[in-house]
């Protein structure tokens, strides 16, 4: 057991000081591509059961991510947030849950939901507790400061990183999470961390990403996996996204709502090759 996961990409993907990071998040909310206002956390328990959020550097994907976190905050506070993201290094366990007690960023610490982690490990032969697989990975870490900013008392998180994203792994993890998140249990949001098409001309990226987003709106996890393979869509977190869609479908989700889509060319300036970012909410 690791007591605390220290930030690996502070000062790189996002500002490394508390003041700088707060300013950066506020800029994302008020950006012309962002929601335009800083959200106020709603009262009561959130009804948001799923969220797809990008994970690039804040100057690029932050305004798009702000749409999802703003909507989540205004809906209320979930009892926990399951974070599922890809392992960009490609090394480590097929699916690893963080073994830490808490995650740290310049905004403080967020507890890891120990009871949910224990329940998932008890039910799954696939998921293992392994902090080494999380070391250096940014896809989940960049989501945490937004959670801390939006809630005075941040809900605990369950960080899961997927090194393997094949269909069998996706179906197994979704089934395991569905079992843990039984009807009548805590209000939990499953957040899938992904960027969309990578390093293509903007018109190509938008055309490809529209096909993937259509599957998200339909809560069609298997269809997303099929579209990514058939159309060669280079989104990095297709597995985590399919997991979130399958879990949401099993929890009677009403469909995915695209809150914002933009590319790095829209947020970071003109570029011949862009990366796509989408924020999709599921209630």
Image (spheres, grey):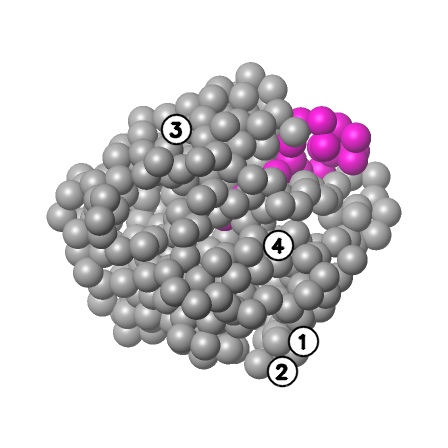
Question: Which quarter of the rendered picture does the N terminus lie within?
Answer: bottom left
Could you tell which of marks 1 and 3 lies nearer the N-terminus? 1
- Residue 147 in percent (x, y) is at 48, 65
- Residue 155 in percent (x, y) is at 37, 66
Please report contact status of discs 3 and 2: CB closer than 8 Å, yes or no.
Answer: no
Could you tell which of marks 4 and 3 lies nearer the N-terminus? 4
Residue 57 tag number: none
How far is the residue under mark 3 from the one under mark 2? 40 Å
Mark 3, residue position:
166
Neighbor class of circle 1 (other Cα within 10 Å; few <14, some 14-19, many 20+) is few
Most foreground residue, 19 or 166: 19
Observer-side mark, 4 or 3, equals 4
Mark 4, residue position:
67
How far is the residue under mark 4 from the one under mark 1? 17 Å
Mark 2, residue position:
19
How far is the residue under mark 4 from the one under mark 2? 21 Å
Q: Is residue 259 magenta?
A: no
What segment is highlighted magenta in the picture?
193-209
227 relative to 250, above or below: above
Mark 1, residue position:
23
């Amino acid at each position: 057991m690791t007591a605390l996961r220290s930030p690996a990409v502070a000062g790189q993907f996002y500002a490394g000081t508390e003041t700088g990071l707060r300013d950066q998040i506020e800029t994302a909310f008020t950006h012309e591509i962002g929601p335009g206002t800083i959200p106020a956390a709603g009262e009561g328990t959130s009804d948001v059961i799923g969220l797809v959020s990008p994970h690039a550097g804040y100057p690029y994907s932050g305004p798009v991510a702000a749409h999802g976190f703003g909507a989540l905050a205004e809906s209320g506070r979930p009892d926990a947030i399951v974070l599922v993201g890809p392992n960009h290094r490609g090394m480590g366990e097929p699916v690893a849950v963080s073994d830490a007690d808490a995650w740290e960023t310049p905004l403080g610490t967020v507890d890891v939901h120990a009871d949910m982690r224990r329940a998932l490990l008890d039910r799954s032969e696939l998921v293992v507790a392994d902090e080494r697989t999380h070391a250096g990975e940014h896809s989940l870490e960049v989501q945490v400061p937004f959670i801390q900013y939006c809630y005075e008392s941040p809900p605990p998180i369950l960080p899961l990183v997927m090194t393997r994203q094949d269909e069998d792994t996706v179906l197994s993890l979704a089934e395991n999470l569905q079992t843990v998140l039984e009807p009548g249990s805590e209000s939990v949001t499953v957040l899938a961390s992904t960027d969309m098409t990578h390093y293509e001309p903007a018109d190509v990226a938008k055309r490809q990403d529209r096909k993937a987003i259509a599957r998200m709106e339909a809560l069609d996890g298997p269809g997303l996996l099929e579209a990514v393979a058939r159309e060669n869509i280079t989104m990095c977190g297709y597995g985590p996204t399919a997991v979130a869609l399958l879990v949401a479908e099993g929890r009677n989700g009403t469909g995915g709502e695209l809150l914002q889509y933009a590319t790095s060319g829209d947020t970071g300036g003109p570029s011949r090759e862009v990366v796509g970012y989408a924020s999709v909410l599921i209630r």
